[in-house]
Image: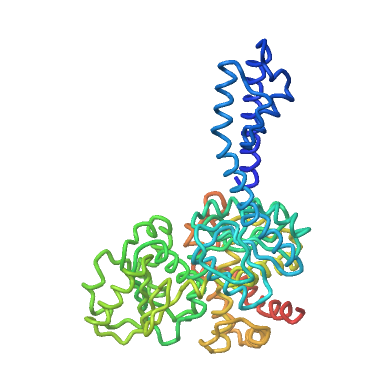
Amino acid sequence: MNRRKRNIQIAIAIAAAYAVVLVLLLAAESRAENASIKSLGDAVWYSVITLTTVGYGDISPVTPLGKVVGIVLALCSLGVFTALIGVLINYISGQARPRRRLKAKNGYKWYAINEENEQSVQFAESVLADDPDAVIIFRHSKEKLMNGRSIVRIDCSPEELTDLKGGRYDMMCFCMGEDSWENYRQAANAAGLGIDTYCLTEFGVEGTSGKLHTFSKKETICRCYWRDHPVQRGEKTIVMIGSGSFAAELLERCLLTNVFEPGRYLNYHVFGDSSEFRKSHREAVRTLCGGDPEDDALFLHEECWEFHPEIIRNADRIIICEDDDRSALATFKELVRLFPTAAEIHVRLNSEVDQIRSFGSSREVFKMSSFVRDDINRLAIMLNDIYNESTGAVSGWNELSDHLKRSNIAAADHMTVKVRYLLEDDSIIKLTEQNCREAYECFRDADPEKRDICREMEHRRWMRFHQMYNWTYSPERDNAMRRHPLMLPYSELSEEDKEKDAYAWEMLGRVADRAGKK
C-alpha cells in the first residue's frame, strides 16, 4: 500500500472520530436546560475553539458527558497542532518537493526503481554513466545510499508516476528488491500499465515477454561467464568447486553451451553437493557419467577436492563457484597455498578483488546492457522470429512454452561456439554481422565431410539440451512424457534427419542479414 492511500485512510479515520465526538457532544448538551451548545454549528464552533486553544468562553458544556468530551478535545489540542505541522512538513519534504523536482525534469528519461539497495545503486550508476541527464527515481528507500541532483526519492506507485509524467513514454520501471517474488508481482503490475518494466527475479525464463522483461542474476552471470571466458582448444579438464545455486546454474550452462565437434570432448570434475543437480538432470547425469568415450565425461565427486590433488594438478581450468564470497576466497587461498597447479583459476565474487581472476561482480552484472540490451536474449528472440518467417508459424516469443524459450536461449548461446569453430578463432566472444557472415560462408562452401561434422555437432548439442531436461528416446513423439524419436546417436539418424541439423548453421547467414538491416 502506498503512502497516498495510507494518508487517505488516516484522514477518513480522523474525520469519523471527529464526527463521533460532535454527535456525543450535541447529544449530551442539546437537552440540558442551561446549555449553550444546542446545534451542530455550536458543537463545531466549540470543538474548533477548544482544539486551537483560543478558548473564547462564549459557549461551554454543562453536562458531565459534555465536560468529558471537552476534556478530550482540550487534551487533543496539542496533538492536533503537532500532527498538522508534521503532516505539512512531511508533505513538503516527502511529496511536494520531489513532485516539483519531477515536474521540472519531465523532459528527461525517468528510471523508476522500486527499492534503493546496493545492487540497484550499482545499476543507477551505470545508467547515469551512459545518460548523465537521466532521472533516477527510488520509490522506496530504507537508507540513502546515493546522492546527486539526478536522484529523486518518492513513495509513489507506477500509476502515479505515469500521471506525473503525463504518459508512460520516456519512463522505465525496474524491480530490483531483495524479494524475488515481490519483484515479479510489482513488475507484472507496472507492465500491465503499458510501461516497459525490467524485473530481477528467479521466476520465469530470462528474456522478454511483452512489456515485462525478466532478468535472473544467476542465469546472467553463468551465461556471460561461458561467453566471455570460452573454453580454449587446448583445454581438456575443467574442475568446478562449489555448492549452492550458483554452482548448479554454472554447471547447467556449461553443459548446454560447451558442445564441440566430434573428437573434442571435455572432462568435468565437480566437487560439492550435487544431489539437487542429480535429481533435476537425471538423464544428462546418466548419459555423461556413463563413460561413453565419444562424449564429454562428468564426474560428480562426493569427496572433498583436497583428497584429489592429482585432479587439481592436471586441470586446465579451475572454477570456484560458491554462493558466499568468504567461502570462495577461503577455498582460493587454500588451493593456491597448498596445491600445485598450472590451471587458470576463476572465482565467482560479488565484489572484485585485486590479483584474483574473478567474475560475476555486482558492477559487472547490474548495468544497463544486462537488463535492456542483452544481445543473447535478443538473439534468442530473433532466432524464433526467423523460424516463424521460414515456416509460416505465428508463435511469437510471448506464446512460446517455457521449454521452447529455453531451447531458443540455448541455441543462441551456442551460436558463438559455432562461429569460433568455423573461423577457428577461440577468442571471439561477441557475434557481429561480419563474423556471422564469414562463418556462414565457411559453412556454405565446406566440403561434405566438414558439413557432416557440423551437422553432428548440432545434433549433439540438441541431444544435450533435451537430456538436460530429461527427454528420452521413443519411436513416437510425446511432449507430455518428454519422449522424442530423434534422441538417437547421430550415426543412427536417416539422411533426411541429419540434414535438419544443417538448419542451425544456415541461421548464421540469416542472423547476419538481420544485423545488416539494422
Query: In the picture shown, does residue 272 fall above or below 158?
Result: below
Quadrant of residue 29 within the rendered picture = top right
Residue situated in front as seen by the camera: 29 or 179: 29
Quadrant of residue 108 within the rendered picture = bottom right
Query: In the picture shown, does residue 26 fall above or below 155?
Result: above
Residue 23 seen in this snapshot:
yes
Q: Is residue 442 left or right of residue 122?
A: right
Residue 205 locus on image (x, y percent): 57, 59
Q: Residue at x 56, y 63 (%)?
A: 215
Query: In the picture shown, does residue 217 fall above or below 514?
Result: above
Residue 476 locus on image (x, y percent): 57, 53
Q: How is the image coloured?
A: rainbow
Q: Residue at x 69, y 19 (%)?
A: 36
Residue situated in front as seen by the camera: 389 or 372: 372
Q: Residue at x 60, y 52 (%)?
A: 90
Residue situated in front as seen by the camera: 66 or 348: 66
Q: Residue at x 71, y 77 (%)?
A: 510
Residue 44 locus on image (x, y percent): 70, 28
Residue 472 seen in this snapshot:
no
Residue 513 locus on image (x, y percent): 73, 80
Quadrant where the C terminus sits is bottom right
